[in-house]
Every structure is written in C-alpha cells, then in structure tokens.
Amino acid sequence: MLKIIVCVKAVPDPKEAHKIKIDPATKTLTRADVPLVLNLLDKNAMELALLLKEQLDAHITVLSMGPPVAGNIVKECLALGANQGFLLSDRAFGGADAYATAYTLAKGIEKIGEFDLIICGMASSDGSTEWVGPEMAAFLKVPVVTRVNEIVEFGGEWWKVKASLENGYRLMQVKLPAVFTVSRELNTPRTLSFSGIIKARKKEITLWDLNELGVLEETVGQKGSPTIVSSLATVNSKRIAEIISGTREDKVEQLVQKLADAAVI
Amino acid sequence: MNKQCGSVWVVAEQIDCRILPVSLQLIGQARKLAKELNTSVETVILGDQMDKRVQEFFAAGADRIYLGNAPELAIYQPEMYTEMIVKLAKEHQPEIMLIGSTSMGTELAPLVAARLGTGLTAHCIDLIIDDNKILEQRIPAYGGLISIICPEKRPQMATIASGVFPHPELDESRTGEIIHLEIPNEISPRVQTLEIVREEPEGIPLESAPIVVAGGAGAGDIEGWRIIAGLSEILNAALGSTRPAVDEGWTELETMIGQSGKMVSPELYIGVGLSGELQHMVGIVGAKVMVAINNDANAPVFEQVDYGIVDDCREFVPMLIEKIKEYQERKITC
C-alpha cells in the first residue's frame, strides 16, 4: 500500500490578507479577524493524493502545524477523502520560520511512521518561500522534486515526474520514499462533497503538542528559527498620481494625450 | 575583529554553459557587501566545459572561483549539486551565500540551508550590512518592508530574483584564483534530472519589454482578463500579472511581476485592476511613466504611479483600446 502524507497549512484567507499588519512590538503578524483557510496550492497536493488513491491502493494522512483552529483545514482534507489527520499544535511551535516549521513537520512525520510519498503545495500564500518541502526532505533524508506539474510514471519504486522550469520543464526520475511539492498546473482540485463532510464527522484528528512530539523546546518555534524579523519599515513612494478626471471619454482622451506627449506609446 | 570574516559567496547558475545574468548581478552586489565586511567574493559554479567562461565571474567582481567541471554536472542534479556545495561550505565557512531565485536556486537553496543548519530568506529586494556587520535581508510584506536577519547561524543565505540588482560593470582586467573541485564518486542517486526541455517563450519577454500592462484581481473574471490582454496586444506590450490573477487561473505563474515573480523596467507601465500591493510594485524598477486604472480611489496604487484613472477597468479599458487605435492610425498617417 502506498502511504501518502499530505502536509497542509492554514493561511490567512488571501482575499482578506491585506488586513494583516505587522505588530511593531512583537515583530510578529497580527492575524486578528482574518479567517484561516486551506492554502490554495495544498488543495492541488490533496488532489494528487486523492487521484493516486483512486488508482492505487493508497492511504492518505494529512498533517498540519498551527493553532488549534487549523484543525478545521485538517477536517476539510478528511472530508475530501483523507484517511487520518494530525495537527501539531503548541504555543512553543509559534513564530517558526521555514526551517523550524520543516523540522517540526519532519518530526511529526517520523512519529507517524513509514511513508512512501509526502506531498505539499509548492508554496504558501502567506510566506511563499517554497522552503518547507525541500527542507523537510533534507531533514528526513529523502529526495525531493519541487514544482511538480505532471506525473508521468507512477506506482513503482521509481517514478517519473515533470517539474516546471523557466520556459519549460525538467523530467525527473525519483525513487520513493520522496517529497513532491506541487504547482497549480498539476491538476484541478475537486470541491467538497456533502457525503464527504458527513463521513469526515466520524474521523478523529490526532493532536500532538511539544511533549507528545518529543522534541526540545529550543528546536521549534521562534527559538528553533535561525532567522528573525529584525525591523519593519514603511516605504515612501517617489511618485504620486495625478488623478485624471472627467467623463469616461474625457479621461480616455486625456490619458492617451499624456502618454503620447511622454512619447511612451 | 578577532576573527577573519568569511567570504561572500554566490552560487552561480548556467544553462548550456551560459552564465545566467542573475549570477553576475549577485556578484556585483556581493562585491559591495564584501567591501563592508572587508572580505572577498567567491563564486561556486557547477557545469560542464565551464573553464572558458569563468573569466566572466572575475570581470564581474569575484576573487575566487570554485569550479566543478564534469559532464555529469552539465545540468542541475539535485543530490550531486547539494552534496558538493554543502561539503564546500563546511570546509570554507562562508559568511554569506547568495543564490538566484530561479527554479534551480529555489530548490537548491533550501536543501543546502537545511543541511548546513542555517537560515534562508526568499525573494529579497535589498541586502545591506547593518551596524553589527550582519546581513539585513529586506522583503516587502504586509504594507511595508520587513528586514530579516540570521543572527547566529552561518552562512546567512538569501535568494534574489534577476533584475533586483543591476548588472555590474565588467572589468576584463580582473583575475583571480580558480579552485577545481573534486567530483564525488557516483553516489547512487535517488533523484535524477533526465532531461531539461526549454521552449522559446511566447510573446514579448516581460523583463525587456518597453511597455508592460499588468492585470490584477480587478479583472473580475476571465472575460475581464481578456480585456486587459487586449490592451497589452494593441500596445505591443508584455502582459504581466499579480498573484491573485495567477491564483484565479487567468494567467500563468511566469507572468507574475514582483517580489516572487519577475522584475520589469519598462518605459511605460499600466497597472489595471490591481491595488498596488508592495509585493507587486517592487517588481517595477525605474519605469519612465506609470499609470494605474482602478475603481477604488483609495487603492494604494495611486500613491505609486504618475497617472491615475478611477474607473471600472472593464468599462474603461475597451474605450482606451479604441482611442489608442485611433492614435496609432493618426501617427502612421502623419
């Protein structure tokens, strides 16, 4: 049986993410009032897991790290068809950079046990570093392919996948167990079904805190993060717009004239 | 200082033996950082038949080059590249390691960082040395710029997009030291690049386009997006985008402008239906004229451009296209 672990992240809803500001005192982000949702690209990761499950004998585990409310996105993945869900949640995990996040997730994966394939979205909409997948692979000492956009051959010990690249792709051959980070082009994620939601009600999410995970406090969260936010600054723009007003016809006329005068069209 | 500061490294990248512009841009910036730290600039390049090319690194400002030259290094091989760079970094203890945020760099950098147990920052738009001789890595986020530092672990690692730093002036008389790297015995690889396929990019490349039209969430739907695309066609412009437009699936990731996308420096930039998030706006460098069309008069974009139109882009842009057509016809007849 193919053991799949999908790593997902609860991110501030991208539609409201602009409301998030940095707290100058704590140097962390205030996420107040912005709901957390399943990271968009992680839906592509879930979709790949579900497609594999349809074609192979597979078992899907969902893993996330975040505040207790992140349990909702794990639940959402269970409703989509994952078999079991884990949430790593502890105040000590807070403020983690990509390195500490990848380390904590890797510890979670080690505790879950054997796996063949770990799938995650290539980036999160809030951090968008693309680091967590490959760093996790490095901690787990397994190979990684990032930005996977097509599965060419699957099912055996060696898989072939395509990964997107500037103006093209690379064809990769990879031996399982491995980590894939996936791009949006890979597939079109399915939407939740009513029956899925009903079935997911019976599925339990396992919560692990610092002690249950069995890691040292200084290796996780802010303490385990090599990088810190040192300062914040506002940016002064060198431009200020002249607002062109009038009727729509006037505005079009004036704008074209200004661009023509500036010799840029 | 009781201890000699480690070097500033640039992990360079090549495609078919051609050195990527971003690698040379980073060497230019590394030169500035190294001057402040009173240390040297060193470049790592892995490839095949690169020996004739390395002079470019010296001309750009490198003092020393670590050259891995072998047929098996011709294209990026994740495990081999990671192994060689990790081994080299452990041996020489660089202070800073800069990598271009290409597809390769974006995969290689975290693999190296995790193995070295150090921090890594993505999509930096500026790098400076602070008063404590620490690398401040500036990133636009949440309406401002945040500075990230890696106070204790070394090297301090960052990825940077092409175009963030200018091309250095080349000094062909500069020379330096070349260290030839030992090629590790064939480890039995668990992941291999079998083939890299690149196609000629369609349309006008964003990075060098004289006119850039960028669309955002304000397009509303794919129909709205096509209207914006129409504006770029009539102007013979390159069509760029913001992350929300990419997330909606209206356009490809390759068209995204900004911090985690492409850097552009056109004569004319027209932002349509976008709010002016800094993550996008930092991608427009030194445009001569900037225009924004947005129905929200309070959108921050109007504080960052020269001309603003407060209007529904789906209504305004079709009329603008017609007027530009008229202008272009007049221009030809004159």
Image (tube, rainbow, N blue to C red):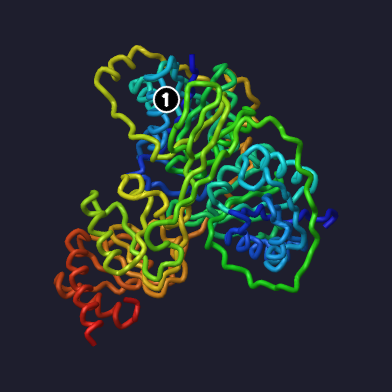
Instruction: Give left or right: position of B325 versus B25.
Output: left
Q: Residues within 10 Å of mark 1 (few under 14, many from 20)?
A: many
Q: The N terminus of chain B is located in which quarter?
A: bottom right
- Can residue B36 be seen from the camera position used here? no
A192 is higher (above) or lower (below) than A149: above
The image quarter in which residue A57 lies: top left
Q: Residue A174 location in percent, x, y? A: 56, 30
Q: Chain of mark 1?
A: A
The image quarter in which residue B109 lies: top right
Residue type highlighted by circle 1: Ala
Instruction: Give left or right: position of A7 versus B203.
Output: right
Q: Residue B49 location in percent, x, y? A: 69, 54
Q: The C terminus of chain B is located in which quarter?
A: bottom left
Compare residues A240 and B87 and report the one nearer the observer: B87
Q: Residue at x 55, y 49 (%)?
A: B122
Instruction: Give left or right: position of B304 versus B103.
Output: left
The image quarter in which residue A34 lies: top left
Q: Residue at x 37, y 26 (%)?
A: A72
Q: Residue at x 61, y 45 (%)?
A: B76
- For disc 1, the marked residue is A49
B220 is higher (above) or lower (below) than B271: above
Q: Residue at x 62, y 20 (%)?
A: A214
Compare residues A212 and B309 and report the one nearer the observer: B309
Q: Residue B201 location in percent, x, y? A: 42, 56
Considering the numbered disc 1 on the image, is that residue within a helix, a strand or a loop?
Answer: helix
Q: Residue B151 location in percent, x, y? A: 68, 48
Going by the picture, which residue comes out furthest to the right?
Answer: B2
